Image (cartoon, rainbow, N blue to C red):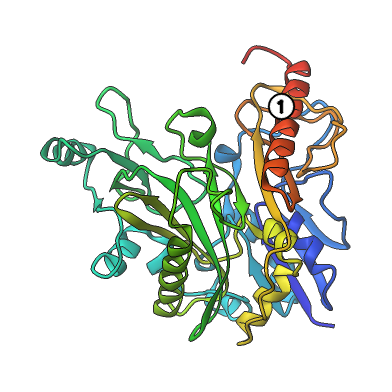
Amino acid sequence: MEKLLLIGIDTRSMLNSALKLDYTVYSTSYFSTSDTPSIKNQKIILNESYGESCGVFEEEFNPQTILDISREFIDEVDYIIPISGISPNDFSKKDQKKILGNVDVNKIENKYNFYKEIKNKFLTPKTFRLSDIDEAYEIQKACPNNKFILKPVQGSGGYNVNLLDNDKCIEFNEDEFIMQEFVSGINVSSSILSTGTNAKTIISSRLLTENDFEKNNSFRYIGNIVPLTKESIMSDVENIDEILEEMKITSESLAKKFRLLGSNGVDYILNENGLYVIEINPRIQGTFECVEQSLGINMLEAHINACRGKIIEVPEPKFYSYKKIVYSPNRNKYEKINLDNIYDLPHIGSITEKSEPLLTIIDKNKDFKKLYEKVELSSKIVEKEVKRCQLDNK
């Protein structure tokens, strides 16, 4: 039986799908959620235990650590699927040959390189590579009618993305940050399967950030809803069919341009000026479980088939599916919460720091309104329970 390694920040959802396929499955992850399947060949960095803090992810996560502890697995397996948090560029040339998915991603993961590749053909925010923070303020002064954001050259999930503000102290590293025109609007995304020469959009989604709920200019990813419809876009948009068609054409064009392999995502911002291409996620996306719930397919199997040149027949969506990540509103010790739609669960008694990811709510329903109401009710129940288990006022 062929051996398959899943490697990344959190492998739970992909593990569930992989275990339904004909592989000997290996897994290395950062997070150790209590609902992650336990398998023979498994390594986890974060060892959650009763009364111990899980720490701050951004301070403690290092892709190289995952690669180092995976060395034995990498040498042993036939195939590797990197998940969010691990780039194909992190692997040696020899090990890249085992990757099922994109390998040459420098023109995609590097946001400034990506901008240069698409700026003359696709609508996209103006982007600048900066030599120092003073240059950012000079550009802002020359464009008084525009807002700008600073973001990492490489990164995902909306971490470390901030509005440029003269009154705010910003730590700047010229090797890591770019300045980009701030485009306000609705966050949407296409999920596509690609063979390198052919591509097919399988579903589109409404992406959600903290700003959708808190109106706090936070761009951190908080979830998504599939499929994208006039209801699920949650805004007064009349020409949804035209928008979906434009997303389909643009996403498939980008997939062919960059010769993408497997499951990939293209993120957009929609406003009165049109669809702005923001970035490509050249790997399995956060919509993974929602797509599986909505379409009734095994997304990992679809990804592998596309990498081998075959794109599945895509069924019509059967359900709406809504995923919402709950970030802890305080420092708390986790106790069991009796809900049937929560995942990525901490171990009982482990401590989650304030603003760190606590758990994920995922549910489905044919009726969008009922689904939205249930997920939001679950979110309120979780936050109430977390506040009850608050440890201090930090």
SS label for mark 1: helix
Residue 145: quarter of image: top left
Horizontal and vertical percent position of residue 69: 70, 58
Disc 1 target residue = 380
Q: Which quadrant holds the N terminus? A: bottom right
Instruction: Identify the residue at horizontal 79%, vertical 68% (top origin).
Output: 18
Residue 227: quarter of image: bottom right
Report how many numbered discs are placed on residues in the image. Answer: 1
Horizontal and vertical percent position of residue 288: 67, 60
Compare residues 174 and 224 and report the one nearer the observer.
224
Horizontal and vertical percent position of residue 188: 49, 53
**Amino acid type of the residue that numbered disc 1 sits on in the rendered structure:** Lys
- In the picture provided, is 23 more to the left or to the right than 134? right
- The crowding category of the residue bearing disc 1, from other C-alpha atoms within 10 Å (few below 14, some 14 to 19, many at least 20), is few
- In the picture provided, is 273 more to the left or to the right than 385? left
Instruction: Identify the residue at horizontal 78%, vertical 22% (top origin).
Output: 385
Farthest-out residue, left: 142
Q: Is residue 3 above or below residue 340?
A: below
Horizontal and vertical percent position of residue 124: 31, 58
Instruction: Identify the residue at horizontal 41%, vertical 67% (top origin).
Output: 246
Compare residues 378 and 41 and report the one nearer the observer.
378
